[in-house]
Amino acid sequence: TQGAVSLALSTPDAILTNTSGVGAAGTLTLTADRMALGGNPVSASGQIVTLQPSSNTWGVDLGSTNDTAGTSTLVLSQAELNGITAGTLRIHSPQGLNATGTLSAPGADLLHLIAGGALNNNSGNITQDKLALTASGDMIVSVDVSNLAVAVTGDAYVQNDHATANITDLDGVTGFTSGGAGTLVLRTANALLTNSSTITNTGGDLAVTADRMALAGGTITAGTRQVTLAS
């Protein structure tokens, strides 16, 4: 269709099924407590695509295939993510967001996961060239990304398996900001961490670990708290 498209199912636990394809020339927003996208196209090339539950008490589970009615969780599988084409894919959870297994959004230039509570992944990595993470709670995630932006109100523990990682600004998220203790780890040997923005801790100590660092392009701020740089 021409222009923006917004499709919402307001009934609790209602399921939105995509049996053919959904497309938009502008922004595309799909809102439903349950979705069965079936790997069929959800396309807004170069635009923002947003997927979210309609109920404010629901969370989001990425990577699972156990989509059962009455669980208060919007479940999106990797196969469903594979069918999405977007400039930016935003997946918004009013409550917590959990990711299971190795996940990616191959048809999106940028993936932004937004949680109204904690944001965690149980196993594997979230793999993307550009990844923004936002949580109103604590965050424990493992990623494999080139460009990363993080905003969390609580404690943040982020480990990155990419050989090069750039802390930057993505989709309205500025650098790496945590409201509690902040830990950023590059686990790959000889990996290079570049700070092109700001790394900020407002409520706890900050620990940054990488074999190589290029920090001159940005700032690191932790107020009166301790900052540890290590390899």
Image (tube, rainbow, N blue to C red):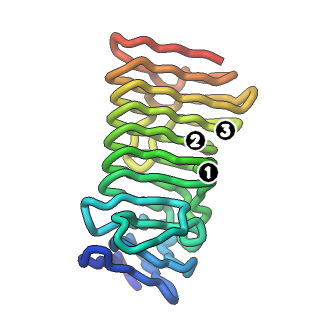
Give coordinates of residue 103: x percent, y percent: 59, 56
- Residue found 31% across the figure and 75% down from its top: 13
- The circle drawn on residue 142 is 2
The span from disc 3 to disc 2 (Cα, nearest Å) is: 8 Å
Distance (Cα) linking label 2 and label 1: 9 Å
Is 153 placed above or below 58 here? above
Front residue of 137/1: it is 137
Closer to the camera in the image, 113 or 38: 38
User: If you read the primary sequence from the N terminus, does the residue marked by circle 3 or circle 1 appear first?
Assistant: 1
Q: Amino acid at mark 2?
A: Ser
Foreground label between 2 and 1? 2
Nearer-N-terminus badge (2/1)? 1
Q: Amino acid at mark 1?
A: Thr
In the rendered image, which residue does mark 1 sit on?
127
Q: CA distance from mark 3 to mark 1?
A: 9 Å
Which residue is identified by label 3? 161
